[in-house]
Amino acid sequence: MTEKPVPPRPGRGALAARMAEILRVDHAGEMAAVAIYKGQHAVLGKAPGHERIAGQLAHMADQEAVHLARFDALITERRVRPTALAPVWRLAAFALGAGTALMGDKAAHACTEAVETVIEEHYAHQIAEIAGRDPALAAELSQFRDDELAHRDLAVEEGAHEAPGYALLAAVIRTGCRTAIKISEKL
């Protein structure tokens, strides 16, 4: 499923409303990413024999925390309300992270690969949409997108596609991410 960039809506305040949607959904996404890695780390962080993935998860979680801190600042500066579903997304994301980690390292990587694939596409569309009217934010999103691509690529290298039931697992996670994106833009 490839989304087309959202064209600017006509009317007074339309651009500001669209920018609020972008910031709200990106803030929600980064908050969820942090929660996914916390869930995975809760299961694999101290588990014997999982030191390698624990280090990878910690590194990716640190990068996601930087992204989240930036969106925390942006929604405050631009007076954008966060999604009303933040508690739901945080809980669901933690459960997703913990659940995939309980399935094993490869399933945890499959989760990362599925999520980051959707987020990379999402950021790419936003960058194209706002590059002309907010180049500074587009540049930040480009950097965040590069981080997400690195996470996805690492997950693939570490065997994401070898996870039990990969095709179904990835499809369910991608659908959930796309649904959360659409909902979070509005709520």
Image: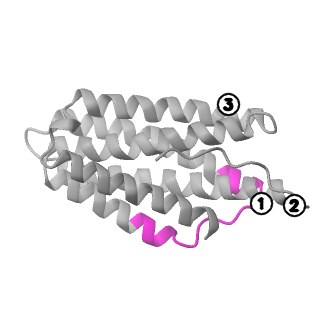
Residue 13: assigned label: 2
Which of the two residues, 101 or 123, is positioned nearer the viewer here? 123
Which label is found at residue 124? none
Residue 174 falls inside the magenta stretch: no
Do the residues bearing badges 3 and 2 touch, measured as CB atoms within 8 Å? Answer: no
Per the image, the residue denoted by label 3 is: 139
Q: CA distance from mark 3 to mark 1?
A: 20 Å
Image spot of residue 96 (x, y percent): 29, 59
Secondary structure under badge 1?
helix
Residue with the most extreme right position = 12
Horizontal side of residue 177 vs 85, given as left or right:
left
For the C terminus, the quadrant is bottom right
Please, which residue is most extreme toward the left here?
A: 48
Q: In the structure shown, which secondary structural element does the residue marked by tag 3 occupy?
A: helix
Q: Earlier in the sequence, mark 3 or mark 1?
A: 1
Q: Which mark is residue 17?
A: 1
The type of residue carrying mark 1 is Ala
Q: Amino acid at mark 2?
A: Gly
Query: Disc 2 vs disc 1: Cβ atoms closer than 8 Å?
Result: yes
Mark 3 touching mark 1, by CB under 8 A?
A: no
Q: Nearer the viewer, mark 3 or mark 2?
A: 2
Q: Which residues are magenta?
A: 73-90
Going 51% across and 68% down the picture, which residue do you hit? 86
Residue 81 painted magenta: yes
The one nearer the camera, 58 or 157, is: 157
Q: Secondary structure at mark 2?
A: loop
How far is mark 2 from mark 1, CA to CA?
Answer: 6 Å
